[in-house]
Image (cartoon, rainbow, N blue to C red):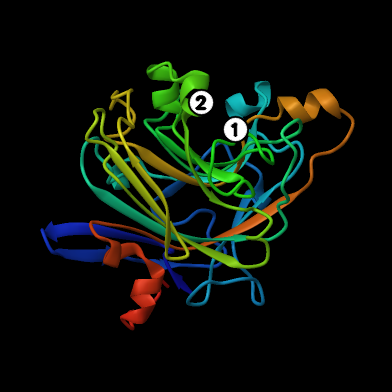
Amino acid sequence: MKTTLFAMILPIALSACMTDTGTVSRNADVPLGHYRALTHHEHGFRYSADGEPVRAGQVSERFELRDGDCGGSDCTNPRYRSEVGVNRERTQARIGENIWYGWSFYNDNIQSYPSNISLMNVFGQWKMGGDNPPSIKLVQIGRGEAYRGGNRSHDVVIQMDDANEGLNWGERRNWGIVCRLFSIDQARGRWTDIVINTNFSMGNDGYLRVWINGIQRCNYSGPITVITDTSLYPGPNFRRGIYGSFTSRWDRLQPTTPKPTMIAYYDEFRVGRSRQDVDIRLIEQAGLPPVD
């Protein structure tokens, strides 16, 4: 059994926190405190079965995306997804406030793509909801695409769509791509530990720091959030899974070729006020229990 993979850590003092957990069956339709984001297909999300990858504890989250999967507005746009999001009442992020996130990602079979057929797979995004662009997203771009330094093989990058569109960054600011994180090919068949620290600021005091397997791969300073409408969420709402965010390239060049089935696992998702709250490596070193 899994006490929810979503360890929601709430501040009760400047240096104290607590974990909100509850019993979840392997057969649960969605993690506690989450919703399915335009993911009506049953195979889109489930908990892991015996023998499948688990980062810590006994159970992980399994996402599967097949050709033709779509729901709601995705069905009339060049995109499809298997994704879950945090419910409104559990959304902790606030614009201008420090927050930490940590989780582990396992690429089961997702391959890299040349830029002319890239599906722009998103493996985590924060947005104010609705049609608003993501403030931050982890997106898999085409091999060598938008390269302006760093490790060229790192095709999973940080992109800031909200600032890119709202501040008219465009090509001069690399379309909002600010950091290259890791290679999807090198992540296949192994766990990748991700830690993110940001404040979602609107101004030049904004920051975004990302660690991959304990190594810092991003240290951005500047504006992050432009749209501040809180009618749907009190702050940037987090979603995770597999989101093929732009299929037009594939559909244009090889319209009769089915898109491959993609599978990924997530585990040990945490939200907190310090790195010690969310970094699975530090948590293991301290001898603390897994989320389940």
Which image quarter: residue 38?
A: top right
Residue 160 lies left or right of residue 209; in this view the side is right
Q: Residue furthest bottom?
A: 287
Disc 1 residue type?
Ala
Residue at image x 68%, y 61%?
108
Contact (Cβ within 8 Å) of mark 2 with mark 1: yes
Residue 95: x percent and y percent? 24, 35
- Name the one closer to the observer, 55 or 223: 223
On screen, residue 115 versus residue 275, left or right, reads right
Which one is in front, 172 or 38? 172
Residue occupying image coordinates x 44% and y 32%: 160
Q: Secondary structure at mark 2?
A: helix
Q: Quadrant of residue 245?
A: top right
Vertical position of residue 239 compared to residue 173: above or below: below
Report the residue marked by disc 1: 146
Where does the image place residue 222, in percent across and percent down from the top left? 30, 33
- Label disc, if present, on residue 175 of the rendered structure: 2
- For the point 32% across and 23% down, which residue is it? 226
The amino acid sitting under disc 2 is Trp
Mark sitting earlier along the chain (2/1) = 1
Decide if residue 170 is in sight here. yes
